[in-house]
């Protein structure tokens, strides 16, 4: 009786695992032999929320923001503020590294300058 009970509990655990996997959704398709195949979808928690599109959007947003700041503050004032920021604590130095002028943001700042002032 002990062996049958263990086999029953093992089968019950497998069924519970399948039920848990299918609870976040599943997809079904018919195989070439006519058999319906059902596979669980990945849960939303296991999917990566960071997509390449989001990374590109983030970088473009940072460049636009920096270009807008350069255009509105003026390039000399912007560089002075970044230099002051680089003399601060570690977080401020990291911010200064991110906010330092590079060719893309300078170009954006030059293009936005007539519209800001």
Image (cartoon, rainbow, N blue to C red):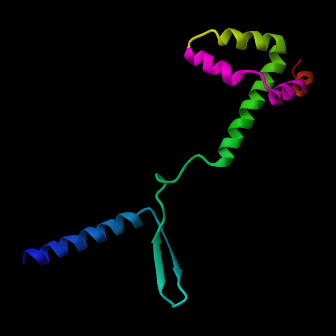
From the image, which quarter does the C terminus lie in? top right
**Within the magenta stretch, is there residue 94?**
yes
The answer to whether 65 is drawn above or below residue 15 in the figure is above
- From where the camera sits, is residue 17 visible? yes
Q: Residue at x 80, y 27 (%)?
A: 105
Q: Is residue 9 left or right of residue 92?
A: left
Q: Is residue 33 left or right of residue 64?
A: left
What is the quadrant of residue 80 in the picture? Answer: top right
Q: Position of residue 43 (x, y in %)?
A: 46, 58
From the image, which quarter does the N terminus lie in? bottom left
Which of 44/93 is in front?
93
User: Total number of numbered labels?
Assistant: 0
Residue at the left extreme, as displayed: 1
Q: Residue at x 57, y 18 (%)?
A: 91
- From where the camera sits, is residue 74 visible? no
Q: Is residue 46 left or right of residue 108?
A: left
Q: Position of residue 108 (x, y in %)?
A: 85, 29
Write down the region rendered in magenta: 90-110
Which of 85/113 is in front?
85
What is the quadrant of residue 9 in the picture? Answer: bottom left
The answer to whether 14 is drawn above or below residue 79 in the figure is below
**Within the magenta stretch, is there residue 100?**
yes
Q: Main secondary structure of the magenta part?
A: helix
The answer to whether 70 is drawn above or below residue 26 in the figure is above
Q: Residue at x 8, y 74 (%)?
A: 2
Q: Position of residue 20 (x, y in %)?
A: 36, 63
Q: Is residue 69 left or right of residue 29?
A: right
Q: Residue at x 83, y 11 (%)?
A: 76
Residue at the bottom extreme, as displayed: 33
């Amino acid at each position: 009786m002990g062996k049958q009970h263990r086999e029953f509990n093992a089968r019950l655990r497998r069924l519970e695992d399948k039920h848990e996997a299918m609870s976040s959704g599943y997809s079904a398709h018919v195989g070439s032999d006519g058999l319906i195949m059902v596979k669980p979808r990945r849960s939303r928690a296991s999917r990566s929320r960071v997509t390449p599109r989001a990374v590109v959007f983030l970088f473009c947003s940072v460049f636009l923001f920096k270009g807008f700041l350069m255009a509105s503050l003026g390039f000399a004032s912007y560089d002075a503020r970044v230099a002051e920021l680089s003399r601060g604590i570690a977080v401020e130095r990291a911010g200064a590294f991110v906010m330092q002028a590079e060719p893309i943001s300078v170009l954006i700042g030059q293009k936005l300058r007539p519209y800001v002032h």
